[in-house]
Image (cartoon, rainbow, N blue to C red):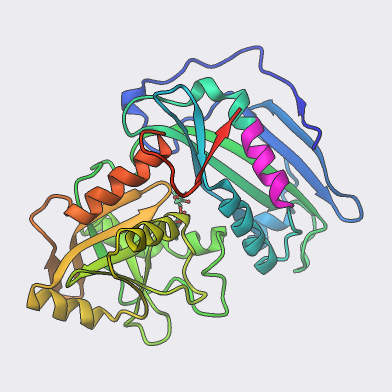
Amino acid sequence: MDIKISKTTTPKQKPDQNNLGFGKIFTDHMFMMNYTEGIGWHDARIEPFHDITLSPACVVFHYGQVMFEGLKAYRGEDGKTRLFRPIMNARRTNSSNKRLCIPELPEEMFVEAVKAIVKVDEDWIPTAPGTSLYIRPFIIATDAFLGVAPSKTYLFCIILSPSGAYYASGLKPVGIWIEDDYVRAVRGGMGFAKTGGNYACSLAAQVKAHDDGYSQVLWLDGVERKYIEEVGAMNIMFKINGKIVTPMLNGSILPGITRDSVLQLCRHWNIPVEERKISVYELLEAQEKGTLEEVFGTGTAAVISPVGKLRYKDEVMTIGDGSIGPVSQKLYDTVTGIQWGKIKDEFGWTVIVE
Ligand code: PLP
Ligand code: COI
């Protein structure tokens, strides 16, 4: 792919690495590429970070034809820049695209674009413990047309944001609200795709959960409203009686790349793993019997996030002693160790940006 690079002449000041938060600061440059029916993807370019001008009639504003991805670049102690399994993000892009009638983006183009923009803004990758450069690729439908139909033109962008922990509490266990009224997705819908609508429809429950002092929402299935699905920005796992149990990929949850990595690690360590339906009543029962040993979320932004409290209707389940559990800690250390190049990458997950 031929990428035209125009660099900024007014670089911004780099932020304080100890106070990054998540997704608030953007680097000097962005990647852009257009799609036009009959031509395909064209005009790959890296430009100074800027606002974009679009017709107010664009399909994306009205009907939400959009997809996005999330991955990170890590700067190791060896000075090397690593990506974590970017090919999985490229594959998931096309799975989202297919569901949303967005044209396919060749996997190698996706990875090349990510590497190119990260290389240009490499000196923005923070090095303070727990920080990284969050990468947000997205595709929007740009036809100016109010009829409901797939757009014939698209814009693919990648923006970068130096970030710290997703949750302000860091590795301190968070409280999660099990939502019993709103639902996020149903099979046949677009729950497995990474698209704006799934997040827009999560906001009302999230506001309710926040008002009650909980960090995020845990969704139940949209039909029987009793099987665990996933959390707003992460997949969820339970350690019950020595086994790691997580909802199977059923079409209504996001197939998380961290989820897949964690399951592979657990199997490698001979920890029994089950991907299956889990009802909220099974959790309540396990809690009562004292076998609900650990609960944690997995995600690119969230990494491994321990859960210390789960609320379902009038019941509040307190998990562990208010600190991260041993398996969650081992997973956190291993996943981040591989990402930062501190631990040997036996799985071939990391890709060096050269
Ligand atoms: N589930 C949802 C709804 C998410 O937004 C995310 C974040 O990307 C995840 C799960 C975790 O996916 P991954 O591990 O690929 O980041
Ligand atoms: C990610 O972890 O990459 C996500 O997309 C989560 C998010 C919605 C902030």
Residue placed furthest toward the top: 9
Is residue 338 shown above or below 45?
A: below
Residue at image x 66%, y 17%? 8
Magenta span has 113?
Answer: yes
Would residue 340 be found to the left or right of residue 52 on screen?
left
Does the stretch in magenta take in 248?
Answer: no
Residue 142: percent from left, percent from top: 75, 51
Most common SS among magenta residues: helix
Image quadrant for the C terminus? top right
- Magenta segment: 106-116
The image position of residue 194, as x and y in percent, is 55, 59
Residue nearer the viewer, 249 or 147: 249
Relative depth, front residue between 84 and 38: 84
Q: Position of residue 78 (x, y in %)?
A: 43, 23
- Say if 331 sits above or below 127 in the image: below
Q: Is residue 97 visible?
A: yes
Q: Position of residue 287 (x, y in %)?
A: 12, 74
Q: Is residue 226 left or right of residue 147?
A: left
Q: Quadrant of residue 151?
A: bottom right
Q: How many marks?
A: 0
User: Hey, which residue is sitting farthest bottom in the picture?
Assistant: 224
| Any part of residue 174 in sight | no
Q: Is residue 258 left or right of residue 173?
A: right
Image: 151 above or below 149: above
Is the N terminus in the top left, top right, bottom left or bottom right quadrant? top right
Q: Say which residue appears at 40% left-offset and 60% top-offset.
A: 264
Q: Residue at x 35, y 65 (%)?
A: 205
Judge by depth and name the residue closer to the eye, 175 or 58: 175
